Amino acid sequence: MTAVQTATDTILEVNDLKTYIFTRAAVVKAVDGISFNLRKGETLGIVGESGCGKTMTALSLLRLVPKPAGRIVEGEIVLNGDDILQKSEDEMRDVRGRRISMILQDPQTSLNPVFTIGNQLREALGIAHKENKSSMLSRAVDALRKVNVAAPERRLDDYPHQMSGGMKQRVVGAIAMSCEPGVIIADEPTTALDVTIQLQYLRLLKEIQAETGLAIIFITHDFGVVARMCDRVAVMYAGRIIEQGDVRDIFSRPAHPYTQALINSVPKLEQSVDRLYSIDGQPPLLSNLPEGCRFAPRCPYVADKCYETYPTTYHLAEGHHADCWALDADWDGTPIEEFIPPTGSAG
Amino acid sequence: MQRFIILRLLQGLLAVFAISLIVFSLSRVAGDPLAAILDDESGKEQIELLRAQWGLDEPLHVQYFTYMRRLLTGDLGTSFKWDRPVAELILERLPATLQLSAFALLVTGVIAFPVGVISAVKKDSWFDTGGKMFAILGQSAPTFAVGLILMWIFAVQLGWLPTSGKGGVKHMLMPGFALGYYNVAAIMRLTRSSMLDVLDTEYVKLARIKGIPEWRIVWKHCFRNALIGPLTYFSLIFAIVITGSVVIETVFAWPGLGLMVIEAINSKDHITVQAVVMLFALLYVAVNIVTDITYAYVDPRIRYG
């Protein structure tokens, strides 16, 4: 195993991760060389359109890429100092749940309908703690209390279909966090919830994080949620991270045209618009990626160079970098600084 | 749960009532029962005498009520052929049929569920393909043919098993397998496809995220969910086994109800046939009720719904 130099408070480091899905017709490059790191107690947002590789990134971190078609072909995932890609399947089970865990998108389907939630919770707890029945019971009650489930003792015997969506998602959270992992991946955990419940859930995650120093990877397509939840953001497009940095930097000085467009597509209350902003075109097929910049066909600043080679990464500030030729000193196309976010009536 | 069971039992009672009507009408529609046992030379008075003795001169609805009243007291009539109470005959033959059917169901379950589950887990492997071939063979070969082929291999050529008759476990192996084999295919394929669906669900993903060993995910989280489809079919299978037993018992000279009913049909003993058909129908209703209750146990959403 290679000794990896990591800063003391870095809990997770991903280097040049590539996860491909091998179908009969083509190779789908779902995750195509991404790198990022995560510190203790930090929240990293991964943002992007559907199908840009966010969920596949999350599953790669748990080594749960759908088999046999999907495979992690390259890269390093360093969790607490050791590369989990070197581990055997047996060793991985000690990692999952205990060191890294995940909250899934849809609470309606992520609990097993034929077992009580007490059963499912105790099962998760049982992996880390081999104890007698009564102490397991009190651990399960504690886990539910932590996620603000009222009267947890009575809820243990309930089946998932007897609970509301928000309640189920809290139970899913309790299961994911029951073994006190250092990292938790939240894959659009509030998308399927009512708007009023969404906020509650996000606040709960923040509270738990403040208490436990949990590091969260928050996957979403909603920049509004990013602003509320995250310390740093990684913007994904077609299997790559095209820009990442501090939340404040990204919002005030988005460097990549795609990031700018994403931020602009969040409707603002104080402006009345006739049409909501949208990005023309569609992301490229991950099975048939263009040679150069993947955003080129939809980019308003595109130049010839963009179609030829994938841009280098340009460092803009501490921890803020983006992949775009327009950031180059020799760029002779439309300067990116002149980008004015479209407001009001467009065209 | 209690309410559910009571409701199901009442529905079962209704079904039994309907069945008794059908069985009764069919046996009357099939022709004059007397024509079967008396020859042309019988005198008119003799016929009238028998007709009155058996209540066949009464209107049909009166006959039906008499028939039902006797049925409820356990009087199934007297067999023409054996000249003994049918109830006695059935009690004598039933254990053998139940034994064989239970063994056939056991064979089905023991082969079909594990093979179905493993086929799904190891989809597209050589095991999956082999299972598929085995299933197709079972589904396409008629029960009696399977019985005869088995008999030729294991009794005639190898001499390992007795050709026919009832005795120890050895006697049961071939007829039991032949009777169960047809169903293996269906249950196996159903289990495989519902397992594939379940393996793809989010709650299985969550179970994996929890770090649970894979065998436990398969047998705890998936199997119970995947069971619901094949379970529906299991009651149908019972029907297939019961009807199949008529054929298999004949092939293997297994002294059960199936063999008896064939003999009764051959000698136009309609009282016996009627009683056995009624019994098979009752068993079928009972199995259906048990299946429904098992569902409710497996899936809490039915229990509370």
Image: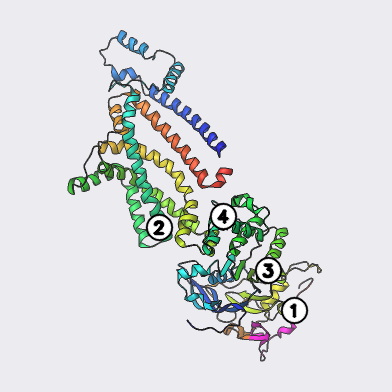
Label 1 to label 4, Cα distance in Å?
Answer: 53 Å
Q: Chain of mark 1?
A: A
Q: Chain of mark 3?
A: A
Residue B138 circle label: none
Q: Are marks 4 and 2 in contact (CB under 8 Å)?
A: no
Q: Chain of mark 4?
A: A
Question: What range of the chain is rendered magenta?
Answer: A314-338
Q: Earlier in the sequence, mark 3 or mark 4?
A: 4
- Tell me the amino acid under the disc marked 3: Glu
- Tell me the amino acid under the disc marked 4: Ser
Residue A134 circle label: 4
For label 1, the SS is helix
Question: Circle 3 is placed at which residue position?
Answer: A211
- Tell me the amino acid under the disc marked 1: Ser
Q: Position of residue A330 (x, y in %)?
A: 66, 91
Q: Earlier in the sequence, mark 1 or mark 3?
A: 3
| Residue A228 seen | yes
Label 1 to label 3, Cα distance in Å?
Answer: 30 Å
Label 3 packing within 10 angstroms: few (<14), some (14-19), many (20+):
few
Label 4 to label 2, Cα distance in Å?
Answer: 35 Å
Question: Circle 2 is placed at which residue position?
Answer: B118
Label 1 packing within 10 angstroms: few (<14), some (14-19), many (20+):
few
Work out whether disc 4 and disc 2 sit on a shared chain.
no
For label 4, the SS is helix
Label 3 to label 2, Cα distance in Å?
Answer: 44 Å
- Tell me the amino acid under the disc marked 2: Ile
